[in-house]
Image: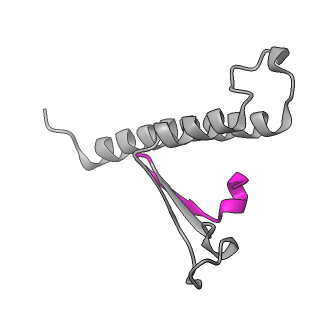
Amino acid sequence: MATTHIEEAERAHVQARAQLESIRELVMCLDHALTCDEAACGADCPHVEDEAREAITEDALSVEVRTDWHTVGAVEAAKPTDYKISHSIEFRGRPMSLGC
């Protein structure tokens, strides 16, 4: 039996919700790593910021950043101004929203 467009859309919606939940948990763990200093708190998250960030980048299909135009050697200007994290769904934003 062939699948209908409605069934395909429902399956895509379920998959997108699962991906979004996974991303939400990863970002919550990053927030936890940034705010909790007690490794014995019982949270199932890394307590080291770099480990939490690494979990986000390893889970994604791709993580890309870009910068604005700047002069050679302008270190502050070379920091990323935008990011894009792609899973099955794609999120874009400014680095400040992830604490970069």
Expressed as whole percent of the image width and height from the top left, the position of residue 36 reads: 85, 31
Residue beneath the point at 69% across and 25% down: 45
Q: Is residue 34 left or right of residue 57?
A: right
Residue beneath the point at 66% across and 71% down: 75
Quadrant in the picture for residue 29:
top right
Residue beneath the point at 51% across and 43% down: 57
- Is 1 drawn above or below residue 77 in the view shown? above
Q: Say if the magenta span includes residue 24.
A: no
Placement of the C terminus among the 4 image quadrants: bottom right
Residue beneath the point at 43% across and 46% down: 87
| Front residue of this view, candidates 8 and 22 | 22
Quadrant in the picture for residue 14:
top left
Residue most extreme to the front? 73
Q: Say if the magenta span includes residue 93.
A: yes
Expressed as whole percent of the image width and height from the top left, the position of residue 51 reads: 63, 33
Expressed as whole percent of the image width and height from the top left, the position of residue 6 reads: 32, 46
Q: How many marks?
A: 0
| Front residue of this view, candidates 36 and 27 | 36
- State which region is magenta: 87-100
